Image (cartoon, helix red, strand yellow):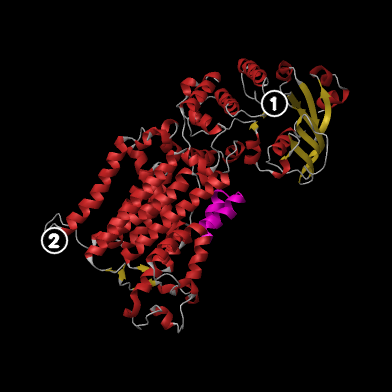
Amino acid sequence: MPALHGGQQRSAWSLGFWIRFLACGVVLVVAVPALNFWVPPDSPAALPDYLVPLLGKYLCYALLALSLDLIWGYAGILSLGHGAFFALGGYCMGMYLMRQIGTRGVYGNPLLPDFMVFLNWKELPWFWWGFDHFAYSAAMVVLVPGLLALVFGWLAFRSRVTGVYLSIITQAMTYALMLAFFRNDMGFGGNNGMTDYKDILGWDIHQASTRLGLYIASVSALGLGFLVCRYITASKLGRVLLALRDAESRVRFLGYSVTNAKLFVFALSAVLAGIAGALYVPQVGIINPSEFSPGNSIEIAIWVSVGGRGTLVGAIVGAVLVNSAKTWLTGAAPETWLFVLGALFILTTLVFPRGIVGLLRPSSRIRARAAAVVPAGERA
Amino acid sequence: MKTAKPLTGALLYLNGVSVSFDGFKALNDLSLIVEEGELRTIIGPNGGGKTTMMDVVTGRTRPDAGEVFFRGTADLTRLDEAEIANLGIGRKFQRPTVFENLTVFENLELARADARGTWRTLVAYLTSDRRERIAVTLARIGLTEQSDQPAGALSHGQKQWLEIGMLLIHDRTLLLLDEPVAGMTDRETEETAGLILDLARDRTIIVVEHDMAFVRSLGARVTVLHEGAVLAEGSVDHVQSHPRVIEVYLGR
C-alpha cells in the first residue's frame, strides 16, 4: 500500500514489518495460551495460571506507554496525567463489573453495589445508569477519557500552554481527580474503589479460560493500538507532529492548525489509555483512586524513556521490562524499588537518552535521533 | 469589510496601526500600502517597528488600533497565523527556522500548499507530480543531494536556502522576508538577490533588510520605518538623500 504514504515513509508498511509484527502476535496469542493450557502443569515449560493475568497486565501497561509515547515522543507533549485517562477507562469497566455482581454481593441488593448499600443509598445515581450493558460501558471506556482529553486539551492548546506548564497542569488534573474519587459521596466506592467482581460477559472472571480470553483481548488491543500509532506517525500528520515539536510557531506560519493537530493526538492517546485501563481492571480485579496518583503518571514517562522515546517499539519494551523488574524486585527486595526507579530515570536522562531501543539500534534513522534531543518539554 | 474604502489594487493595506508593549510604542499609527506584484524593501534602525509590522501582518501580534486588510477584503486582525498563511501570505524569519529533525525533502513536503487540515494530513500521500514538484524545487535551491539528510545537518546558508525553497513551493501571493541574507557570504547574498528578483516576477514580496548594498541590488521601492511609523518612502537614492533619514541613521 505504498500509495497511502509519503516520502521516505514507504518502508513503514513493508513486508518485513508485517512478518515481524505477525510473528510477535503469533508468539503472544498462540504460544502463551498453549504453554498454559496444553502443557502439563508439572512440565518445566508450563506457564503457571497466575502468570497469565500478570502478562495481560504488562500488555495493558504497554498500551498505556504507547499512548504516552505518541504524544510525548512525537508531538513533544509531556502529559504527566496520563494515569487519569487509564483510571477513567478502568472505572468505566469497574462499574460494569460491579453491576454484573447482581444479588451475589454481601448485601444481596439486586441493583445497588455493596458500597452504596453500606452508605445507605436508596437508588442508583444517574451516572450509573446503563453500566449493566456491556456495549454502553465499552462506549463509555472510549468516550469518557476521550471527551475529558478534548475539553482539557482544547483549553490548554488553544491558550498555547506548552512544555513544563502543560506537564504541571496535567499533574494537577490527575491529582484533582484522585481527591474527587477518594470521596465516598462521589459514588465510585471512595478509597476502597470497586472490587469483588464475579463475571464479565457471563464468564466467571476467576476461571483460567476467562483470564486467557482477557489476555488475548489485551494482546489484540495492543496490536491494534500499535498499528494505529504507526499509521499516524508514518502519515503526513506524523511529520507535522515532529515539526511542531521542534518549531511550533513555524508550523502555524505554514498554515497548519497546531491546536487541532495536538488535540487530535491528545484525545486519541487518551482513548488508547482508557482502553488499556478497561482491560487492566478485570485482570487485576480492582480499581481504586490510587490509580490517579501523580506518581503513577510519572512512572509511565519513565517506562517510555527507558524503552526509547519516539520509537513505538521502545514504549512497549520499556513498559514490559520496567514492570517485570518491579514485580520481581518488590518481591525480592521491596525497599530498593524506588531507588532503582529513580536510578533508571537518571540513567536514561544522562547516559542513554535514546533508551534501550536506541542502544540496540545505533545506526537508527532520524526518528530515534529526534528522540535524543533535549526533552521537548523543556524548550517551551 | 467594515467601512467602505477604495482599496482596489492594494494587496496589503495597513491604516493607522498601533502596537505597544508595556508602554513602548512599537508601531505608532503606521500606514502602509503595498500594491499587487510589487517588490518592496523596508529598512530602518533597530526598534523601528519592522519585525512588529511583520508580526501584525502574519497574525502573531494583534494591533491595539488600526486596520489591516489583504486584497481589500480579508481583515488580518481577526485571523490567526494558520488562517493567514492559508490566504497566501508566507513569512521567512530572521533566523532560519527549518524543521531540524525532518529531512530536507520532508521540510518541503510540509511547506506544500495542500492537505493542511488535521484530517487531510492523516490520509495525504505524495503523487508522482507532487514528488516531481519537490524535486524541481530541490534543484532550484541546490539541495538535491541533501534531500534525505536531516535539515539540522545543513550549513547556515543552506538552511536559509531551504527556507526560501519552502516559500517557493507554497505558491504564496505575498512573501515577507525578514533579513534574508543575514549571515550569508557575499556570494550567497548575490545569489539570493537573483533568486528574489526571480521570485518577484510572479508574486508580491516585502523584504526587511539592514544591508544597504543588498537593498540597492534589488533596486526596488524603499520604505523607511522609524519609531513605528513611515519616515520616508521612494527610490533608494531618494531615501538616502532624505535629510530626516540621514539624521536618524547618523544621529545614532
The answer to whether B33 appears left or right of A276 in the picture is right
Q: Which residue type does callout 2 highlight? A: Pro
Label drawn at residue B121: none
The answer to whether A101 appears left or right of A232 in the picture is left
Mark 1 element type: strand
Label drawn at residue A41: 2
Quadrant (top left/top right/bottom left/bottom right) for the C terminus of chain A: top right
Kindly identify the residue that appears in the image at 52 percent across and 22 percent down.
B138
Quadrant (top left/top right/bottom left/bottom right) for the N terminus of chain A: top left
Residue lying furthest right in this view? B243
**Taken as a whole, is the magenta stretch helix, strand or loop?**
helix
Q: How many numbered callouts? A: 2
Kindly identify the residue that appears in the image at 53 percent across and 37 percent down.
B115
The quadrant holding residue A44 is bottom left
Q: Which residue type does callout 1 highlight? A: Ile
Magenta region: A148-172
- Protein chain holding label 2: A
x and y percentages locating residue A191 in the rendered image: 43, 73
Mark 2 element type: loop
Label drawn at residue B205: 1
* Mark 1 residue crowding within 10 angstroms, few (<14) / some (14–19) / many (20+): many
Q: Is residue B147 above or below residue A127?
A: above
x and y percentages locating residue B252 in the rendered image: 81, 28
The quadrant holding residue A276 is bottom left
Q: Are marks 1 and 2 on the same chain?
A: no
Kindly identify the residue that appears in the image at 42 percent across and 48 percent down.
A346
